[in-house]
Image (cartoon, rainbow, N blue to C red):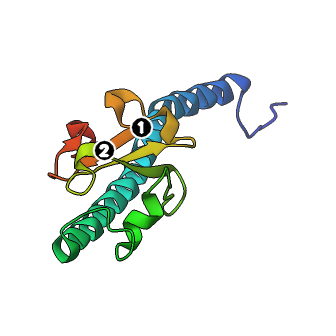
């Protein structure tokens, strides 16, 4: 008598597990890269927004560091930090003492995972100067 069995053999099941494992090993790093890039976009947008607000202060008051009328500078001065949206970055401002009124440099620094692992090309720190210069350039593309 021959029994008619249905189902998978252990070998067929192991082959399926190996195939799924290979697919995950290929797809997961790509997924993480995509997540980091989208989180980086949030930081770039916030840097651009802060820069525009500082430029409006300069247009209105001929200085970036007008503490009375420029709310964004007031928030960032003396080591103040702005943490946009999902909180993956902190944004700070710096400038040289001799040109405090006419220059600035905004820096977004990664503060939590997965952005802290975004070290390829130095993308865990983004900077935007008052001149519009962006660094690192490859991270702004």
Q: Position of residue 92 (x, y in %)?
A: 42, 50
Q: Residue furthest right?
A: 1
Q: CA distance from mark 2 to mark 1?
A: 26 Å
Front residue of 94 and 8 = 94
Q: Earlier in the sequence, mark 2 or mark 1?
A: 2
Q: Residue at x 60, y 31 (%)?
A: 16
Q: Residues within 10 Å of mark 2 (few under 14, many from 20)?
A: few
Question: Which quarter of the picture shows residue 43?
Answer: bottom left
Q: Residue at x 56, y 34 (%)?
A: 20
Helix, strand or loop for disc 2? helix
Q: Tell me: 30 left or right of 83.
A: left
Question: Which quarter of the picture shows residue 137?
Answer: top left
What's the mark number on residue 97?
2
Helix, strand or loop for disc 1? loop
Front residue of 103 and 127 = 103
How many tags in the picture? 2
Front residue of 112 and 68 = 68
Q: Tell me: 72 left or right of 113.
A: left
In the image, is residue 24 above or below residue 89?
above
Q: Residues within 10 Å of mark 1 (few under 14, many from 20)?
A: many
Q: Position of residue 15 (x, y in %)?
A: 60, 25
Q: Residue furthest front?
A: 98
Residue placed under numbered mark 1 in the picture: 124
Q: Position of residue 84 (x, y in %)?
A: 48, 61
């Amino acid at each position: 008598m021959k029994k008619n069995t249905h189902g998978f053999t252990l070998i067929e099941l192991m082959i399926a597990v190996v195939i799924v494992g290979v697919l995950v090993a290929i797809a997961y790093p790509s997924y993480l890269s995509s997540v980091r890039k989208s989180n980086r976009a949030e930081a770039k947008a916030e840097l651009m927004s802060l820069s525009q607000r500082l430029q409006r202060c300069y247009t209105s008051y001929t200085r970036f560091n007008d503490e009375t009328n420029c709310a964004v500078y007031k928030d960032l001065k003396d080591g103040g930090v702005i943490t946009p949206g999902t909180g993956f970055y902190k944004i700070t401002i710096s400038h040289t003492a001799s040109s405090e009124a006419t220059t600035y440099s905004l820096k977004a620094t990664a503060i939590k995972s997965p952005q802290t692992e975004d070290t390829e090309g130095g993308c865990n720190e983004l900077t935007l100067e008052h001149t519009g210069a962006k660094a690192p350039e490859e991270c702004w593309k």
